[in-house]
Image: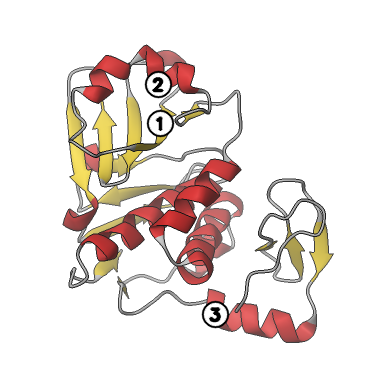
Amino acid sequence: MESRKCPNCGASLELTRSKTMLECPYCGSKFEVEAELREKIEEKSNSLDEEIFVIERDLSGSFDKEHAGKCLMTLLYCMNELGTAEKVSAYIRKSMIKGSDLAAEGINDSLINAVRGRINSELEPGEQIIVYKDQGIFSKGKEFTVLTNRRFLFFTKKKCTPAAFTDIATLRFDDSSDCPAWQINGDYEKRIPSMEYTGQLTGAAVAFACLSAFEQEPDHVRIRLI
């Protein structure tokens, strides 16, 4: 299905949780979904590519939770509608909000500059920062997550734990709180945090990682969602 554009700002419209409206995540405009378009959207957005994922849990209940539902809907949108890591990267940049704990090159990059030396010491040649996520007030600049074009880097006070996209075999979805998160390969040190309160960018970050894994390694094993 061809993505619909917002007539007010040109951004891609997203289906709301009720699946009766299309909403612009950037200017907030909303538009009623025509019955025919709604049917097409539901058919495509209710499933993930079985060549990429093995779904081993019932996620239907998660869709009913406000932030977890937003996270999953964004994952579906990025996987099914955008379809490439490059397009998801552009989506992430457009969705970022200034004045938060998120940063990228040219967006709130003072956060990155404060720990630039620590990040740069871990980057490989050709590796680029997509998103920097600080863990919050009490650990500001000490504990943070970096999404690059190749992997996640999880920084704590003492070390950096990398998680290459091509090494992802399982993703566990944690929707037990208002801040949905994902855990890679059963390793708590490789926990993708909630990027922002709605869960939108968390879903986009997971989609970026999964799409990148298969773009970098076309015969990559299917990723188990548990």
Q: Nearer the viewer, residue 208 or 197?
A: 208
Res 9 seen here: yes
Determine the image quadrant of residue 223: bottom left
Evaluate whether residue 139 shows in this view: no
Which label lies toward us, 3 or 2? 2
Say which label, 3 or 1, has the lower sequence index.
3
Given the current orientation, which residue lies at the most extreme front position? 126
Q: Residues within 10 Å of mark 1 (few under 14, many from 20)?
A: many
Measure the C-alpha gap from mark 3 to mark 1.
31 Å
- Location of the C terminus (image quadrant): bottom left
In the picture of the structure, the residue carrying the numbered disc 1 is 132
Asked if disc 3 and disc 2 are in contact, CB closer than 8 Å, the reply is: no
In this figure, which residue is indicated by the disc labeled 3? 44
- Measured along the vertical axis of the image, is residue 120 above or below residue 10? above
Q: Which mark is residue 85?
A: none
Disc 2 to disc 1: CB gap under 8 Å: yes
Give the amino acid at mark 3: Lys
Q: Left of 21 or right of it: where is 93?
A: left
Secondary structure of the residue carrying tag 2 is helix
| Residue plotted at (26% across, 35% down) | 153
